[in-house]
Image (tube, coloured by chain):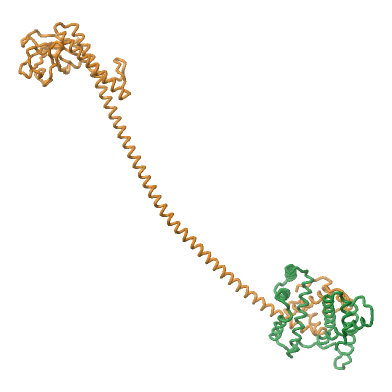
Amino acid sequence: MTLSNSFEAEELKRFLFRELGDEELEALEEQFFANDELFYELVDLENELVDCYARNELSAEDKQRFENSLERVPERAEKVANARALENFIKKEKLAAASALESSINVEKQTAIQDVDSKASLWERISEFFTLKMFTLQYATAALMVLIVAGAGFLVYDRFRLNRELARIKAGQQSRTADLERRSKLLQEQLIQVQQRERTIQTELETSSGQSDILSTQLDRERNERMRLEKELERLRNEKGNVPPLIPGKDQNRPPQPVIASIVLSPSAGTRGGGGVKTVEIPTAAQQITVTLQIPRDSAANSFDVKFGGITVGSGVKHAKTASGRRYVVVSLAAKRLSADKNNEFDVTGDDGKSYKFVFRLKKR
Amino acid sequence: MSNLTAEGFEKLLNQLDDDSRRAGEKYEQLREKLTRSFLWRGVLNLHADVLADESLDRVAKKLTEGVEIENISAYACEVSRFVWLEHTRKNKEIPTDETPEPAPAPAPVDSDERLAFLNKCMQEVVKDEDERRLIVAYYDPDPGEKIKETRRKIAEKLGITTNYLKQKASRLRIRLEKCIRECIAEAG
């Protein structure tokens, strides 16, 4: 029951329940005849009371008052019956509306589902499209990956190859450098030896007599050899670029060079050509001895075998010739093989069968 | 049974409103007030309509007699009291009916038949689907304590005041009840 509890509403209820006196009733009648709003307020209130009574929603007091009014307003019972009919009608109407709404919703749902289906179909098409695209992309990606892997592999291989090539080149360069260094060192050593021989020959030339021609020739040859070696060394320096120039006595890292002594011998006495035993002075530090052996003029041989102490130190050695036509052969041997205590002998046998003996004494200074 | 003449009816309408359409509406509204007032005084439906017409006839007759009536509604209210008193007095003259009109049992129709009449009347009386929806919404028994709020929303949705909504719903219900009464009478 939602009726207002205001005094006005209560007065209206009293009117409807026939609880007003004649004067109050007539006063209210005059009011609702003059006021449409009040009249329909009364009509509406009566309908509400009837409906609530039909639904058994009135309070006990109002229900009693309502039932009391039924005796004074006999047609109200008919209104109650109509109210029940109206309530049933409304319930059915709402049920039908709900059913229609449900159907409508179902239709809308179905439509929505169809829409969704159609959208799903669209999505499927899109999905298929993208699936195809994806497959294509996947293939493309796979191909790209293969290319990338292959490219990476090639790059790795190429890098490896280049590194290997570089290493080979570096190794070659190192090898070449080492070779150049080795050759340079060798040339330096040879140059030093030549320079020492040159100095020895120069000394020999200054102190010897009768052998100046050979010594001069030998000196020239040594000088030529020195020049050749210097040129060769210069070429190597240019080629290598880092071969240190040879500055004797200044290069502390230079390996100790062997001290080379050079001696010139003529056939000893007792042999063909005769002559006494010659004493040869060599530096105490001399490690290597270069021996120039003069070949007698009668020899017709072109090459010679040279033995020292019975041991061959040169075989088939070609003779050299001075500008004046004197011939000689040069051999080299370790200084330690020479004896300072006794005679040292070289046996030279030409390919013409003739032999010559060179005897000398060694003196270290 | 009505003694209303064409001249008297025309004078009454002219007195109610210069516009004939609005005059007709006011006439119907006045008649409804008269009928309701008789019913609330305990007059049966069968008699309430007759007494309402009698009241209007008397008002119209006064107009044709040249009586100046400033307020037709108020005058009709005064007339209706005399009509009701006459009706009461007449009923009291019947020896077996000393009390006001006996409270009759509802018309002898079962609920299904009444519902069928209501359905029929909904087709005949209710003009369109909007009025049908209005009946259902306005008298929906479910809203409970929120009925005033529900009716405010209905009025707001229809673009009318709650008072006018109340008026429309009440008129529709009156028409439906009258239709059902006629259906029952025809069926009986």
Q: Nearer the viewer, residue A324 or B58?
A: A324
Residue visible at 44% across and 58% down? A132
* Residue A242 image offset from top left, x and y in percent: 32, 23
Q: Colour of chain A?
A: orange
Quarter-of-image position of residue A354: top left
- Residue toward you, A10 or A100: A100
Residue B42 locus on image (x, y percent): 83, 84
Judge left or right: residue B90 versus residue A231: right
Q: Quadrant of the N terminus of chain A?
A: bottom right
Check the image and report above or below for B181 versus A248: below
On the rendered structure, is B53 left or right of A161?
Answer: right
The residue depicted at 55 percent of the width and 66 percent of the height is A115
Quarter of the figure that contains the C terminus of chain A: top left
Left or right: where A84 falls relative to A120: right
Chain coloured green in the rendered structure: B
**Residue B73 makes an appearance in the image:** no
